[in-house]
Image: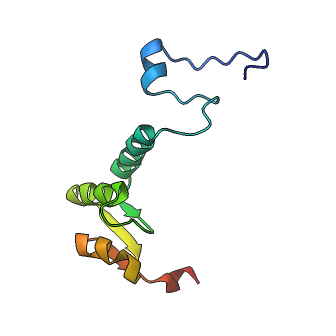
Amino acid sequence: MNHGVSVDTGCSGYERDNFCFFLERKRISSERSLRRNYFVAALATSIFIPYAAPKSSTEMFCQEILKWGKQVYTIDDERNKNLVAEGLKPVSTEIFK
């Protein structure tokens, strides 16, 4: 919905299709969110992943960023045993109390 308001994103056609975020978008695509996650992970010194289901795209993301030598943490819980087995460091929930 425009409501007569013009927003100049400063993006060319190529950028509009590939990089710029528009206010009109109600939800980010899975491809864009994955790109964002990799970008943020590349900038971070350590990463916290609270949970990732076995064989999920989040678990595959964890495997990839571990290859980069990043410090990756998860909650010390039985449901995260797949992540700990991959190399994520378990963190006790006691630190959140």
Residue 31 can be seen in this image? yes
In what quadrant of the picture does the C terminus appear?
Answer: bottom right
The residue nearer to you, when weighing 2 against 6, is 2
Residue 22 falls in image quadrant: top right
Q: Position of residue 23 (x, y in %)?
A: 64, 30
Residue 61 falls in image quadrant: bottom left
Across the whole image, how many numbered discs are drawn on residues?
0
The residue nearer to you, when weighing 53 against 45, is 53
Q: Position of residue 66 (x, y in %)?
A: 25, 61
Q: Position of residue 50 (x, y in %)?
A: 45, 69
In what quadrant of the picture does the N terminus appear?
Answer: top right
The residue nearer to you, when weighing 46 against 48, is 48
Q: Position of residue 48 (x, y in %)?
A: 42, 65
Residue 79 located left or right of residue 26: left
Does residue 56 lie above or below 27 as drawn?
A: below
Residue name at image x 37 percent, y 57 percent: 58
What is the residue that sits farthest to the left in this orientation? Answer: 67
Residue name at image x 37 percent, y 52 percent: 41
The residue nearer to you, when weighing 75 against 58, is 58
Residue name at image x 47 percent, y 13 percent: 13
User: What colour scheme governs how the chains and residues are painted in the rendered image of this protein?
Assistant: rainbow
Residue 76 can be seen in this image? no
